[in-house]
Image (spheres, rainbow, N blue to C red):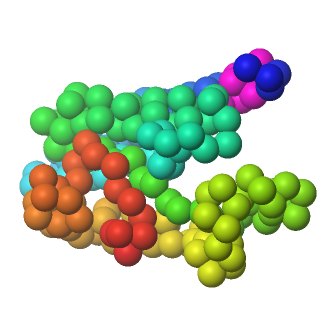
Amino acid sequence: YDLPLSVWDDMHRVGLRSHYVSSYYAAPLLLAAAKAEPGRRPLLCMTSSFGAVSYLFTTAYGVGKAASDRLARDLQVELGPQGIDCLSFWPGLVLTEKVKELLTRDPSRINRVTGGQDPDRVGESPLLTGRVIAKLAAEEKLRQPPFVTPPGLTGQVCIVAEAA
């Protein structure tokens, strides 16, 4: 309520819309790949955050992340029967340039995420999420029950640190 409306627009026009637009353009390619190799299930994924279910940073951030998770679930309903698995990934505190800058400018915001622990100790490299996604994309059986969660992962949230 106390931030400019542009913050809301940025979270949804840039973040959420980017997930939707990329899914829109990727779906035909993934469907073609699934048809070309029956039994192979291509992976459509997006990054989100535990901010989808717990307050983190701003209201706009949390609503955008919750919507990204919903997008993955709904795309799984639509694309799953056609051979595509959809997942939403929740990395932990990713030590990006922006997070490092925020740590020096406003460490209290990062401390809320880490519970006061040293971000260098509890943070994740941006490479970790990519490696987890690559592994799950390459080994479809890891997306199925009983791995990571009892019902499997498709249409679910995948916590990066747990999947690693």
Image position, residue 147 (x, y; %) = 17, 66
In magenta stretch: residue 92: no
Q: Residue furthest bottom?
A: 121
Query: Residue at image x 73%, y 20%?
Result: 1
Answer above or below: position of 71 versus 54: above
**62 to the left or right of 2:** left
Q: Is residue 126 visible?
A: yes
Query: Residue at image x 50%, y 60%?
Result: 91
Report the magenta residues as a range. 5-11
Image position, residue 24 (x, y; %) = 43, 30
Name the quarter where the C terminus is drawn: bottom left
Q: Quadrant of residue 81?
A: top left
Q: Residue furthest right?
A: 105
In the image shown, does 102 or 75 lie closer to the viewer? 102
Image position, residue 3 (x, y; %) = 80, 25
Answer above or below: position of 25 versus 111: above
In the image shown, does 84 or 88 lie closer to the viewer? 88
Q: Is residue 134 visible?
A: no
Query: Residue at image x 39%, y 60%?
Result: 159
Q: Quadrant of residue 56?
A: top right
The majority secondary structure of the magenta stretch comes to helix
Answer above or below: position of 73 versus 140: above
Answer above or below: position of 97 versus 27: below
Image position, residue 90 (x, y; %) = 45, 54
Query: Residue at image x 63%, y 81%?
Result: 121
In magenta stretch: residue 6: yes
